[in-house]
Image (spheres, rainbow, N blue to C red):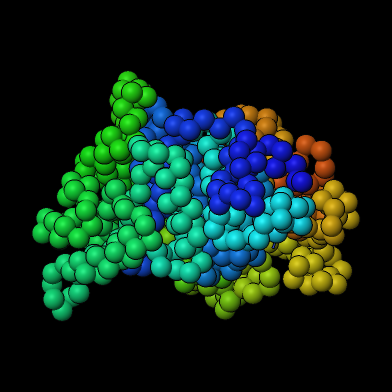
Amino acid sequence: MSEENNLLASVSDVSMESEFFSPVPKGYKKGKTKYVFVLGTVMSGLGKGIFSSCLAKLMQDKGLKVTPIKLEGYLNIDSGTLNPFRHGEVFVLDDGMECDMDLGTYERMLDINLSRANFATSGQIFSSILNKERQGDYLGRDVQMIPHVTGEVKLKLRQLAMETEADIVFVEIGGTVGDLENAYYIEAMRELAYEEGPQSCCFVALTYILEPKTLGEQKSKAAQLGIKQLMQLGVQPDIIACRASNPVTEKVRQKISVYSNVPVERVVSVQDSASIYKIPAMLRERGLDHEVLRLLGLQDRINLRHERKEWARWCDFTDRIDSLKYDVTIGITGKYITVRDSYASIINALEHAGISLSGKVDIKWIDTTDVTDGNVKDHLEGVDGIIVPGGFGTRGAEGKIACIKYARENDLPYLGICYGFQMAVIEFARNVCDLKNANSSEIVPDCAEAVIDILPEQKKIEGLGGNMRLGGRDIEVKQKTKAWELFGRKDAVRMRFRHRYEVDPKYIDTLEKNRMVFSGKAPDYPIMQILELPEHSYFMATQAHPCLTSRPLNPQPMFVGLVAAALRRRSESS
Ligand code: GLN
């Protein structure tokens, strides 16, 4: 029997005779944690994660402890191998989990750090079941989608509830109702609601209201059909959130209400918003927070004073969005320039930094495939600063190096992120330290001057032949550097990493002699983590991904530094 099974309270209900199989962790108290399920109908891409995180924020403001979980239908164990072109950026949690970008939305909106317990895929669920099957946990039973697979899902949710001691777990189910791959998740939700009893669960269906240009009016049929499909699975929604480009009319809401047994005050319009940070206010105006409290019987647990304080703080922030005084343009070089989701965290971090400085940050995307020293000036026309973001492989690398050279030589503010840090080292090695063949062994595997390399030390440290170095790591910050000032003179900061290559320590001396300063290092190994050029107005780069930890009310300092430098440059030139 597996170790996990020993930790279960009621798995002993399983027998050849009983059809019940609902593993519950030992010590689990029914009623302590409530569940809000957020499902999508009609189509994907409705912003379930945004909606769910905004609703969770309203509950958190009331002093309730909330935690989200995203359930993905795909069979990958994590998002590490997913192409950002198809799925948006790979978000990395502090514990090293590579997950869906929605977890980033939750972290930002709720200002909390999540862990691998907040993310599940079908791959994880099935691999856990198959392991248990091999260990004989199912006591001679045939292992079935119901009750075993659904049981595993319920177990995961209850474990999360117990571990976090949450008042509410927000469960977001990836994909759309009707997808074969998430059907068993929905069935598990239905079972969980039945087992937990009245006032324990709340189902929210996100749907889409079409407004064809040719008709000029909103049509609810697709929404009705989508909700019907959910009801056919035995789930009665409690709240229907209607996504639409424009506010949803009373007539359409009434129609949906009639077809879905949901009172019209719980059929709400969630129309497009210029900023996702304004959505909590929209949901609050519709009274959704109080509806959820009532549905879950949580009125007694809330703290009104806490809510008043938190809400005031939040409104101060959102008010600033409407009164941005300056404009600044940041160029981002990137391979995935057609898919903005690939750079979601960077876009968010720039927005946070901008708002904190009352500036609106416009982004200019720069495809570097054709950029050379000869034409770089034209490509960077109109930008007040540039970012070379994370990346893999070789495409566009020389163009990125040309951009960095231009930034360095022309005092254009620069922020390099991970790959952008490595490219900055290569550029400096070639053009300042005279190491003409400097490169990364990711780009030229047999490179003679591989200033960026997979190091034998790292292979040893990380095991398994140079696996990705993943997750949160402490960084020692050198005193009296720009980084140290930016981080409020803290000697240590923590950032998240996702890389395989790094600066080869044998070149550090040369780089430093030529006045590149490594202002952030790993405490235990010679891994360079932040660099800066003291003579430049703002030339900084980090091997980490600082964008992953930027929060609306707590913008990441390296981004604030970049936007501030870009604003200075813009005001000096005008
Ligand atoms: N490809 C580089 C590495 O593996 C950079 C990775 C990244 O930018 N996330 O080290």
Q: Quadrant of ligand 1?
A: bottom right
Image position, residue 404 (x, y; %): 61, 62
Given residues 546 and 331, the one toward you in this image is: 546
Is residue 59 positioned above or below 218 on the image?
Answer: above
Task: Give the residue displayed 31% in from the left and 27% down from the top.
Answer: 299
Residue sitting at 30 percent across and 38 percent down? 295
Q: Residue furthest left?
A: 251
In the foreground, 347 or 94: 94
Rendered residue at 47%/63% (across/down):
183
The number of numbered badges drawn on the structure is 0
Foreground of the two, 215 or 311: 215
Position of 133 relative to 82 (above/below): above
Q: Confirm whether residue 181 shows in the render.
A: yes
Left-right relation of 158 to 256: right
- Does residue 21 appear to the left or right of 309 in the view shown? right
The residue at the point 41 percent across, 68 percent down is 178
* Residue 99 in view in this figure: no
Is residue 571 or residue 2 the one in the foreground?
A: 2
Which of the 4 image quarters holds residue 314?
top left
Image position, residue 69 (x, y; %) = 51, 47
> What is the x, y in percent for residue 308?
30, 25
Give x and y (percent) for residue 10.
61, 38
Residue, far front: 17
Q: Which of the 4 image quarters holds residue 449?
A: bottom right
